[in-house]
Image: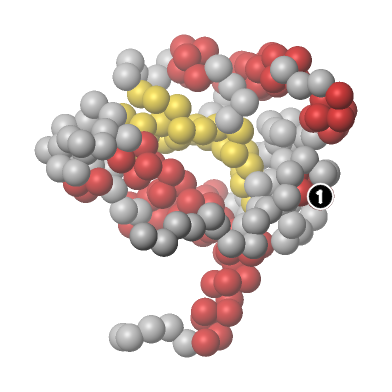
């Protein structure tokens, strides 16, 4: 096979355009089979040295979710205190977490100490293991979107506190906390752009050497 059909290419481009960071969810439950099918995409993700360093913690308990949401609320208040003027006004109106309604919640961690992969490719750039986790998350995100499911990435958290609250093994580093569910609305434009926080570039910055 030398390539996919123009129709497939168009659909893939639409999928990439419509993949948004969702914070506003419907409370509707998701078929567990859909989530399981999308989670299998992790096994197809690239990883440095085939180390597969991602570790997934499903957060199903009311206690775990409450602890994560309280963590977010405190970290978000601290973040707001760091802004002033118009930025503070815009920030205070942003919804930066879907923890209140998303029916599925999980966290992804990087086990940088894994011996799988025998260190190949990570000796000069140890951060490649975290990058591998991010690549896996992106594949999972696109798979969810292909099933009509949205996801939001929460990074406004105290990682050490979350590690304690979720009782994860020592040495795991937080990649993100993820809220998953059916979105209230569909948008091609990021919410932060719609709110006037920042503008997206049409092309990435590039240097030619």
Could you tell me which residue is drawn at 19 percent across and 44 percent down?
121
Asked if residue 189 lies left or right of residue 167, the reply is: right
Vertical placement of residue 114 versus 150, above or below: above
Could you tell me which residue is drawn at 48 percent across and 57 percent down?
206
Q: Quadrant of the N terminus?
A: bottom left
Q: Residue furthest front?
A: 209
Vertical placement of residue 11 versus 144, above or below: below
Mark 1 element type: helix
Can residue 129 be seen here? The reply is: no
Within the image, what quadrant is residue 92 found in? Answer: top right
Asked if residue 55 lies left or right of residue 114, the reply is: right
- The way the protein has been coloured in the rendering is secondary structure
Q: Position of residue 6 (x, y in %)?
A: 52, 87
Tell me the residue that label 1 is attached to. 194
Within the image, what quadrant is residue 156 found in? Answer: top right
Q: Quadrant of the C terminus?
A: bottom left
Q: Position of residue 203 (x, y in %)?
A: 59, 62
Could you tell me which residue is drawn at 65 percent across and 47 percent down?
21
Exactly how many numbered labels are in the figure? 1
Q: Position of residue 145 (x, y in %)?
A: 60, 59
Vertical placement of residue 77 versus 109, above or below: above
Could you tell me which residue is drawn at 61 percent across and 33 percent down?
154
Closer-to-camera residue (189/146): 189
Vertical placement of residue 176 versus 14, above or below: above
Can residue 56 be seen here? The reply is: yes
Crowd rating for badge 1 (residues with CA inside 10 Å; few <14, some 14–19, many 20+): few
């Amino acid at each position: 096979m030398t390539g996919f059909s123009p129709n497939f290419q168009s659909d893939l481009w639409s999928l990439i355009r419509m993949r948004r960071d969702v914070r506003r969810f419907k409370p509707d439950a998701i078929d567990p089979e859909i989530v399981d099918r999308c989670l299998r995409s992790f096994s197809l993700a690239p990883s440095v040295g085939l180390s597969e360093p991602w570790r997934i913690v499903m957060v199903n308990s009311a206690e775990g979710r409450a602890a994560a949401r309280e963590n977010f609320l405190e970290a978000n208040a601290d973040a707001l205190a760091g802004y002033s003027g118009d930025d503070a006004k815009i920030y205070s109106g942003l919804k930066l977490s879907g923890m209140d309604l998303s029916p599925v919640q999980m966290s992804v961690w990087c086990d940088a100490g894994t011996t799988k992969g025998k260190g190949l490719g990570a000796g000069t750039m140890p951060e490649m293991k975290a990058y591998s986790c991010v690549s896996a998350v992106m594949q999972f995100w696109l798979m969810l979107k292909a099933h009509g499911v949205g996801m939001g990435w929460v990074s406004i958290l105290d990682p050490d506190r979350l590690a304690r609250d979720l009782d994860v093994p020592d040495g795991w580093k937080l990649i993100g906390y993820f809220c998953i569910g059916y979105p209230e609305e569909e948008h091609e434009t990021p919410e932060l752009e719609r709110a006037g926080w920042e503008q997206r570039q049409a092309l990435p910055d590039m240097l030619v050497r």
